[in-house]
Image (cartoon, rainbow, N blue to C red):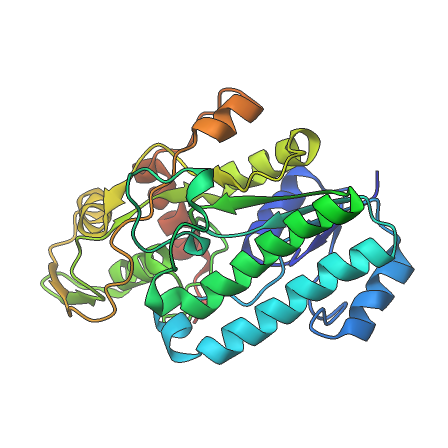
Amino acid sequence: MKVVVTGGTGFVGKRLAKIKPDWIYLSSKDYDLVSTEDCKRMYQELQPDAVIHMAGKVGGIKANNSRPAEFHYLNTMINTNVVHQGYLHGVKRILAALSTCTFPNVAKEYPLTEKDILSGPPEKTNLSYGYSKRSLYIQIDSYRKQYGLDYSTFCPSNIYGPEDNFDYDSSHFVPALIRKFYEASDRDVLEFWGTGKALRQEIYVDDLAKIIPILLEKHHSAVPVIVSPHENFSILEMINILREQLDKDVQIRFNDKLAGQFRKDGSNEYLLNLIGDFEFTPFAEGVKKAYEWYEENRGINGE
């Protein structure tokens, strides 16, 4: 089966390529998927049997909050083109990545389950990105119903690890945390967004890369499968985990700005019932690996 991966040279794509080197990994330099004509050309030239769709405009809370129109437009156009042109070109299998940002800001019960995906609006700092991902979920479900296609989605929690984006202006929390600690000297004061109380599930990138091929093989329903580890730490707890590992004498301060969603932890019960037992990388182990990678490769991505 010829499998094409959009967003294939991005963070997850780079790690996925180590596991599935025979798949075709695309970047925006190959095809601009915002353009309908370029998306058509992609399907005509490559004629894939299946598409792993991970292309999109992504960023941390600061980028999402300051450039909402950009995030909404680019993601909506990319998603719409990939799915619709896939249908027009006879592609029977698409597996598309959503995000836990798709889920409501506040839920009646936690952890979230797949049935909660449309039960309330996303958190306001991620509203544009969240709704663009909701639109992708609805589009996939619609094409399943009307055309009988084997199109499905999955929702990974926050992703971190080697080869992440460590640029302060566009990175997520964990890579920013790693860079701050790398650059810090003893007795420095490190400032972070929010209050430190927000809860987050962080999945190690290689864990997700191992799970994606299994989902391609086994996930054939409309359920937006949540892909998350068991651990659910506060921002402060994650900071302290890395601080203790590095034994750095630094102080931590929060600016009370852009605190974001308080919690969005998802249940992995459906996932594990689908793929079987899976050993997730503990955060303490994964963040140490990510820090060591940055220490050895700083400047490659995000400086």
Residue 160 x/y as whole percent: 42, 50
| Of the pair 199 and 210, the residue shown nearer to us | 199
Q: Name the quadrant containing residue 110.
A: top left
Q: Is residue 239 above or below residue 300?
A: above
Residue 182 x/y as whole percent: 29, 60
Which of the image's four quarters has the N terminus? top right
Residue 241 x/y as whole percent: 22, 43
Residue 146 x/y as whole percent: 76, 48
Q: Name the quadrant containing residue 42.
A: bottom right
Q: Residue at x 42, y 38 (%)?
A: 228
Q: Residue at x 71, y 45 (%)?
A: 145
| Of the pair 291 and 219, the residue shown nearer to us | 219
Which of the image's four quarters has the C terminus? bottom left
| Of the pair 168 and 100, the residue shown nearer to us | 100
Q: Is residue 166 above or below residue 52?
A: below
In this picture, residue 107 sits left or right of residue 93? left
Q: Residue at x 48, y 45 (%)?
A: 156
Q: Residue at x 66, y 29 (%)?
A: 218
